[in-house]
Amino acid sequence: MPDSIGKRQRRDAKTKKAAAREERRIARAERRRDRAAGLIEPGTPIEASEDLSYLDVVPVAEAEPTEQS
């Protein structure tokens, strides 16, 4: 008897997740080898922050404390 649709979908989803896990594992191992060889800097790569100039947000300076007598 053939698999039901639900079983097939679950099996396909598990297969996709397993493939993604394997790709991440291989990428991590490659980065570790590159770090050990000195090709890349140790630690998490820090990407440039997103350009937010299109928001037209002006940073608000902190107000000076007023003297209370």
Image (cartoon, rainbow, N blue to C red):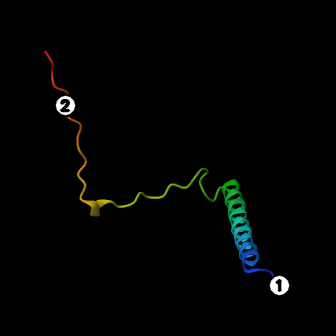
Secondary structure beneath label 1: loop
- Left or right, residue 21 beside residue 66: right
Residue shown at the point (58%, 52%) measured from the top left: 44
Q: Nearer the viewer, mark 1 or mark 2?
A: 1
In the rendered image, residue 39, in percent from the top left (x then y), is placed at 63, 59
Residue shown at the point (15%, 18%) measured from the top left: 68
Q: Quadrant of residue 4?
A: bottom right
Q: Quadrant of the N terminus?
A: bottom right
Q: Quadrant of the C terminus?
A: top left
**Residue type, numbered disc 2:** Glu
In the rendered image, residue 67, in percent from the top left (x then y), is placed at 15, 21
Q: Residues within 10 Å of mark 2 (few under 14, many from 20)?
A: few
Cα–Cα span, label 1 and label 2: 74 Å
Vertical arrangement, residue 15 with respect to residue 64, above or below = below
Judged from this view, the residue extending furthest toward the right is: 1
| Nearer to me, 31 or 51 | 51
Residue shown at the point (35%, 61%) measured from the top left: 51
| Nearer to me, 17 or 6 | 6
> Where residue 66 is drawn, which disc sits there?
none
List the residue tagged with mark 2.
64
Vertical arrangement, residue 30 with respect to residue 1, above or below = above
In the rendered image, residue 57, in percent from the top left (x then y), is placed at 25, 55
Secondary structure beneath label 2: loop
List the residue tagged with mark 1.
2
